[in-house]
Amino acid sequence: MEEEQPLLTGSINQGSGDYGAHDNGQLDQHEESPGSRRLSYSATDDSYRVLEDADADLYIQQAVVFIEDAIQYRSINHRVDSGSLQLYRWYYSKICQWGLGFTIAVVLALAFIETPSSLTYTSDIRFKPKPWEPPCGLTEGIEVVCLCIFILDFTVKSYLIGWEEFRMNKWLIGYIVVITASFIDWMLSVSMACNENLRVRRLIRPFFLLQNSSLMKKTLKCIKKTLPEIASVILLLALHLCLFTMIGMLIFSKSDDPKKNGEWETYFKNLPKSLSSLLVLLTTANNPDVMIPAYSLNRGYSIFFILFSVFGTYLLMNLMTAIIYNQFRGYLLMSVQTSIIRRRLGIRAAFEVLCCPGRGHTSTQSEGHVERVAVNMFLQVMDRVHVKSYCRQAIIKAAQQFPDGFINGEAFQRLFNELDKDFMKEHPPKPEYSSPVLQLIQYIYSHFYITVLGNVVALANVICICILNCIFILYYLIEMLLKIVAFGWRGYLSYRNNIFDGFLTVLLLAIQIAIFITYRIPYEDVDPVPQHVMALWEMVRLVNMLIVFRFLRIIPEIKLMAVVASTLVDLVKNLRAFAGILLVVYYVFAVLGTWLFQGAITPPSNMSLISDSSTENKTGGPFSMDCGTFEQLEYWPNNFDDFASSLVLLYNIMVVNNWHVFTDAYTRYTTEWSLVYFVAWWLTSSVMWVNLFVALILENFTYKWDRSNALSVEDVERIAYQSTVQLMFREHVQEPTEEELLAQLQQHPHLHLSW
């Protein structure tokens, strides 16, 4: 379950052991408000001030919202009067949140159609046609609508948390600053008839994506805190690079013999060239090319390059990966700690507002202050709470087990431990048959060995592909029908593996029937193109592809493969925040790249200079025909001429293979300072983010593998892991104490409680 946007992100770490937003003074100084509740207890007369029944519905409404806040790890520091709670639940409804997400996607996608437009079939500058440019006012009109929605979003958030909390929320303050700057830049664009060279608001649009995700904010904060440790390793890498650069320039200095100057001329001619050559070697992109000129003269020169790679690539770079993983994991654990505290605080707040006199709040003079909630009131609350159905059923079932009909505070917290448990999907019961034949079919085709046999047949089909496809398809059809008989419709569809098999079987059967109807038997040798939409050979190829694809049914039957596959699915579902940060970085660098290098690379006027193999090794100007250069490799589609091509070029550099080709080309076509941009992108994407993402994949896989050790293959398929980041680090999180929770509840800016 992904963490929703909290209304207060800066309220947790106010001090050691203090998880409150800010100090509101003594409790006896609070004034009563429509959304407040003050409980009074007298130890002398054992009596309570009885509240009006009209307030009961408000308390239930407050408890519902607090529980939903706890489920989504949201802050509870928001208004709690009836009208505000209705607005709050409307704001966090699926429709509003999907609408806000769609608005963010639209405003980010404008970069693809704004000038310079990416709406061309190719990005190759040699053949690229003039792109369609939107008329002035089209994208501006869409953007102003999006900005108005963001203003509405900001207004609702600010109202719900109140002025005191707003002043402490840096993200909301930044939100209004970014909206204001975007409006100013938008007005400049309109006043200049859309002829401005730079649109500053394009660079700050990713902020809308960041501020809408709490987990992305936490990730960004963790990255920020990890940077000092990463900087120390980067400094060590820089020293390593500089040291070997100096040694290399001494070893490969210019010689009197021109035949021995190959290494100096190509890689060590000056300091910038030497640095860039060894920097690329650090990523192994130009290995062994950088070594060959010297190695061909004397094999001893290889020692220099091997030592450089061993210390730089295999020691320092891997050390950086370890530091990034360790430091980021520690800071992420701290952020997860605050999320768990929010959950416990929300549940505790719900308990407190339900502990009303006459509603299960009882105590005796001997027992002291005892608070309890009536089960029937708790069930009313759970009926209104938006939560997954299986969690609701488990919590309600646990609540109904209390014999006296009341729930104390500790038990109230334990009820919501169901949110952290795995959900085991129970398959529907098998149908009961009176016929011995059907009972035998049910016994055979519900047995595990039939699944094994099906996998063997699928493997045999792959081996014998293109041979006797009809027989295999017939077997698949019979297997599907008999399994439906054995398990029943609902039981058959409750297995994901059966759904996969059945869909492909029906599709294969439909294509095979289409082949028979279209081409008849025996096949008449006529030209199929003018008569049929798809040629026979193409249909056969499609069938063969589906048969190979069907063999993926083996994945759920092997435990390790099942865990790996489910880990990949969870990464897509639950680690979207990390991919979101990478998207923001891509967006910013793509916009900067378009500003800096748009139109920098232009093809020669005479393309024969590039394609003619009889030309000399070098041509005039910036165009080079050296082997492995931008021009010789025909990398013309890789450019910064529009937003889409910029994204692709940045991806190619992130992969680091041949990334030196791009840096060399842009240093020749522009200036050597362009190398700063590419090195910054390499450090951000390949060094930091890829290593971080690998670390998180390892953490996710380890978490799921450890939990699956005690399970069978069938249980691994049945279990529905909730591998959120919070649960991945759950066992390392320290639970807040009762005193800490009560102290923070006392600091709530809108809900005033007294004991």
Image: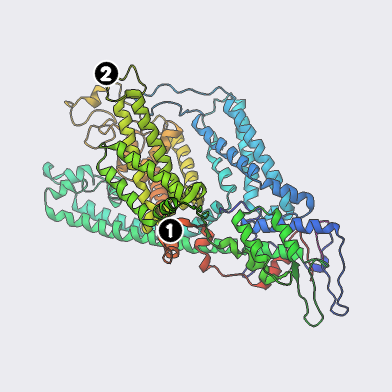
Tell me which amino acid carries mark 1.
Answer: Glu
Q: Position of residue 296 (x, y in %)?
A: 12, 48
Quadrant of the image containing the N terminus:
bottom right
Magenta part, dominant SS: loop
Residue nearest the viewer, comparing 333 with 657: 333
- Was residue 644 drawn as part of the magenta stretch in this picture? no
Q: Tell me which label, 2 or 1, sits earlier in the chain.
A: 2
Q: Is residue 400 left or right of residue 262?
A: right
Q: Position of residue 742 (x, y in %)?
A: 71, 69
- Say if 509 sits above or below 236 in the image: above
Question: Which quarter of the figure has residue 43?
Answer: bottom right
Q: Residue at x 58, y 25 (%)?
A: 138
Question: Which quarter of the figure has residue 105?
Answer: top right
| Start-end of magenta stretch | 33-38
Q: Residue at x 83, y 58 (%)?
A: 55
Pointer 2: what residue? 526
> Dot 2: within a 10 Å radius of its alpha carbon, few (fewer than 14), some, or many (20 or more) residues?
few
Q: Is residue 357 left or right of residue 695?
A: right
Element assignment for label 1: helix
**Residue 66 appears in the figure:** yes
Residue 714: which disc? 1
Quadrant of the image containing the C terminus:
bottom right
